[in-house]
Image (cartoon, rainbow, N blue to C red):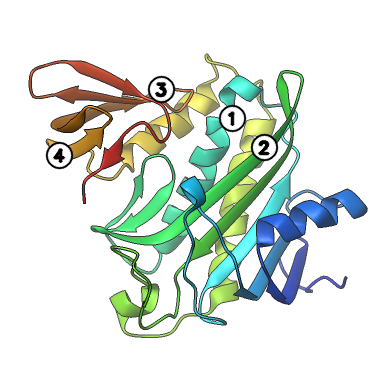
């Protein structure tokens, strides 16, 4: 499979696949694949997101891609740091084009109250470390209209009223991601790591609805709470209007939009 020249990471462009995560996972099983190798497709027939949600993307209009890293230096208990650096890389690249970008816990990217990017991370664990990580994301770039029943999608085109170079944006994201990753690689990743603490603080400052009380729902029903912090393992810490502290793992609580 030929690589695209003059790109900051090894890059494979394919016309169509059901899922770039699945395609890259199979490709890794059959080939020796360099770290940061990125697969992008013009048409993704069955893109998936968190909790099995479908991702709508008009062919040729958006970024639908996946990349692979081998973060054996990161312990499995600290795997949320990968989610943080991916989210920050996409947020910071989008901020070159638009304002009001935030990260909706754990790793959706929002413009104001609308979703512009979804991320799916799949880790392979060996012992206490991560042997392989495939990260897929769908970033809405040039789509002018959304037809699915998704409640709040938005694209860069809809915000700016102009088309954008998708590969230029992807190049910027991967350069930022690679820089974050290499900084982590030069440290021992543990709770006391200064680099990890720096990234966690940047992530927390970037969070969606980080100020004030907002509506959430869990298995007990709807409630009002404000965001306190995110733990190193990714748990969300909220405090409700009665002063009760609430701790949530992924999928245990939902924002009411």
Q: Earlier in the sequence, mark 2 or mark 4?
A: 2
User: Marks 1 and 2: which is nearer the front?
Assistant: 2
User: How far is the residue under mark 3 from the one under mark 2?
Assistant: 19 Å
Position of 24 with respect to 196 (left or right) is right
Q: Residue 21: x, y in percent?
A: 67, 55
How far apart marks 1 and 2 lie (CA) works out to 8 Å
Q: Nearer the viewer, mark 3 or mark 2?
A: 2
Residue 247 shows in this picture: yes
Pair 4/3: label in front: 4
* Structural crowding at the residue carrying mark 2, measured as other residues with C-alpha within 10 Å and reported as few (<14), some (14–19) or many (≥20): some
Element on which disc 3 rests = loop
Which is nearer the N-term, disc 3 or disc 2? 2
Question: What residue is drawn where x is 61% and y is 46%?
Answer: 179
Q: Nearer the viewer, residue 20 or 71?
A: 20
Q: Earlier in the sequence, mark 3 or mark 1?
A: 1
Q: Residue at x 78, y 48 (%)?
A: 35
Q: Which residue is mark 2?
A: 123
Which mark is first along the chain, 3 or 4? 4
Quadrant position of residue 67: bottom right
Viewport quadrant of the N terminus: bottom right
Q: In the drawing, does residue 147 fall left or right of residue 85?
A: left
For disc 4, the marked residue is 214
Find out whether the residues at labels 4 and 3 contact each other: C-beta distance under 8 Å.
no
Alpha-carbon span between mark 4 and mark 3: 20 Å
Query: Residue tagged by mark 3?
Result: 231
Q: CA distance from mark 2 to mark 4?
A: 32 Å
Return the residue at label 1: 79
The image shows residue 93, relative to residue 163, as above or below, that is above
- CA distance for labels 3 and 1: 12 Å
Are there few (<14), some (14-19), or many (20+) residues within 10 Å of tag 3?
Answer: some
């Amino acid at each position: 499979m030929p690589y695209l020249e003059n790109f900051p990471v090894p890059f494979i462009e394919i016309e169509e696949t059901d899922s770039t995560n699945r395609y890259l996972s199979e490709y890794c099983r059959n080939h020796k694949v360099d770290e940061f190798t990125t697969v992008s497709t013009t048409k993704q027939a069955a893109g998936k997101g968190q909790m099995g949600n479908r991702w709508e993307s008009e062919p040729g209009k958006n970024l639908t891609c996946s990349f692979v890293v081998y973060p054996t230096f990161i312990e499995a208990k600290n795997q949320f740091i990968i989610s943080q650096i991916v989210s920050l890389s996409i947020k910071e690249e989008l901020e070159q084009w638009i304002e009001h970008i935030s990260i909706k816990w754990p790793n959706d990217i929002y413009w104001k109250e609308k979703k512009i990017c979804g991320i799916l991370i799949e880790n392979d664990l060996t012992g206490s470390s991560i042997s392989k990580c495939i990260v897929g994301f769908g970033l809405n770039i040039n789509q002018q209209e959304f037809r699915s029943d998704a409640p709040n999608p938005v694209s860069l085109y809809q915000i700016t009223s102009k088309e954008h170079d998708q590969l230029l944006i992807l190049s910027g994201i991967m350069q930022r991601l690679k820089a974050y990753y290499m900084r982590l690689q030069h440290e021992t990743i543990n709770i006391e790591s200064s680099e990890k603490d720096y990234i966690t603080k940047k992530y927390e400052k970037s969070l969606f609805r980080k100020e004030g009380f907002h509506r959430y729902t869990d298995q007990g029903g709807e409630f009002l709470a404000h965001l306190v912090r995110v733990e190193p393992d990714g748990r969300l810490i909220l405090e409700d209007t009665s002063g009760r502290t609430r701790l949530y793992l992924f999928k245990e609580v939902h924002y009411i939009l």
